[in-house]
Amino acid sequence: MTATRSTRQRDVIAQVLEQAPGPLAVTEVFELAQGDLPGLGIATVYRTLKLLTEQGHIHPVTLDGETRYEAAGKGHHHHFSCTRCGRVFTLHTCPVALPSGTVYPGGFVVEAHEVTLYGQCPECARA
């Protein structure tokens, strides 16, 4: 595997994802990164997301059929999707006590789980 050089675009996009409260859609990454890089193009965002995913720095999350991206290394966590503003947040607690290896009736053996909660984020709930 060849090393890739660091660029301002890659650094800004990685920083946007690292500081995000949850996984971001491509358009959200694009809009946030443009704050630091006004000339940034959407094609650069797509290429950078692909590269950062291949390098293991970020990973895709599919919620409601949409691919979003978040920084890797956050450990076991789940997501909250606001039905009012559309933002997605990372939940750092697990609402389900479901250990790997749990066997459900019929012989279903649990290896992992993903949970997305839906409702209103604190900002929308106050409005």
Image (cartoon, rainbow, N blue to C red):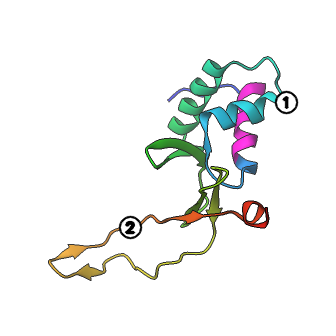
Which residue is nearer to you in this view: 102 or 82? 82
The quadrant holding residue 52 is top right
Write down the region rendered in magenta. Answer: 8-17
Residue 40, quarter of the rendered image = top right
Q: Is residue 71 toward the left or the right of residue 76 in the image? A: right
Q: What residue would you read off at disc 1?
A: 36
Q: Is residue 7 visible?
A: no
Answer with the quarter of the image where residue 112 lies: bottom left
Mark 2: secondary structure: loop
The amino acid sitting under disc 1 is: Asp
| Residue 27 belongs to the span the image colors magenta | no
How crowded pointer 2 is (Cα within 10 Å; few <14, some 14-19, many 20+) is rated as few
Q: Which mark is residue 112?
A: 2
Across and down, in percent, residue 55 comes to: 55, 38
Q: In terms of depth relative to the viewer, which is nearer, 63 or 17?
A: 63
Viewer can see residue 8: yes
- List x then y, in percent, for residue 30: 69, 30
Residue beneath the point at 50% across and 36% down: 54
